[in-house]
Image (cartoon, helix red, strand yellow):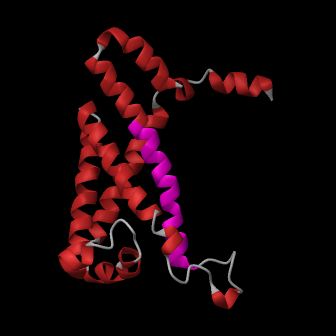
Amino acid sequence: MDHLIKKLSELDLVRGDFDYHATRVAMIIVFFVFSCQKWFDYEAHALIPFISNGPLIFWLYPVFGVRGAAYFLGSAELLFGLLLLLGFWSRRLAVLGSLGSCATYVATVTIIPFFPDAWAAPAGGFPAATLPFLFLMKDVVLLAASIYLLKQDILRAAADVSPAQNGIVRQEAMQ
């Protein structure tokens, strides 16, 4: 096993930035796909139980209404996806995109404890979960990916601000 680990550690795939770029591309795709859905009426109504029970986003309905809340979220997701995309060329925009991504998934993950009927009663309840609840659970992983990107983007942007520490910051980004 040690030999395998040693050989794998020597691969360019492991030594390079593939994980960072793959995570960024995946997050861009997720934001673009999900932002497009918010412009359809069916999606605006499908969001009602999520937004209504979100401690950080419940205010969207009184302020914007059902369709307006969906448009607001879709616009925010599109903006964050664009910032993440532009982050390939601008480290400062990368930081903004990663911050927006973190905020998005903090807002959705905080819905989880408050989501009604999370456990499937016909299946006996816990641990059998309902599909809408499981849909929210994927956001835990997306939040972790967002935090990873934010850390990497801050370290990379810091290297631009203080080139003297470029080697130190770059080394930390690779850990």
Observer able to see residue 67: no
Q: Is residue 94 above or below residue 33?
A: above
On the image, the x and y values in percent for residue 32 come to 30, 58
Q: Is residue 73 above or below residue 128?
A: above
**Which residue is painted at 32% across and 78% down in the image?**
43
The dominant secondary structure in magenta is: helix
Say whether residue 141 is left or right of residue 55.
right
On the image, the x and y values in percent for residue 149 come to 41, 39
Q: List the single residue furthest toward the right.
A: 1
On the image, the x and y values in percent for residue 132 come to 50, 77
Observer able to see residue 19: yes
For residue 146: magenta? Answer: yes
Q: List the single residue furthest toward the top.
A: 164
On the image, the x and y values in percent for residue 121 come to 65, 88
Judging depth in this view, the residue of 81 and 158 nearest the camera is 158
Say whether residue 139 is left or right of residue 75.
right
For residue 134: magenta? Answer: yes
Say whether residue 51 is left or right of residue 62.
right
Location of residue 51 by image quarter = bottom left
Q: What is the tally of numbered marks visible in this picture?
A: 0
* The N terminus - image quarter: top right
Location of residue 86 by image quarter = top left
**Which residue is painted at 42% across and 56% down in the image?**
106
**Which residue is painted at 33% across and 68% down in the image?**
57
Location of residue 157 by image quarter = top left
**Which residue is painted at 68% across and 83% down in the image?**
125
Q: Which residues are magenta?
A: 130-150
Judging depth in this view, the residue of 93 and 31 nearest the camera is 93
* The C terminus - image quarter: top right
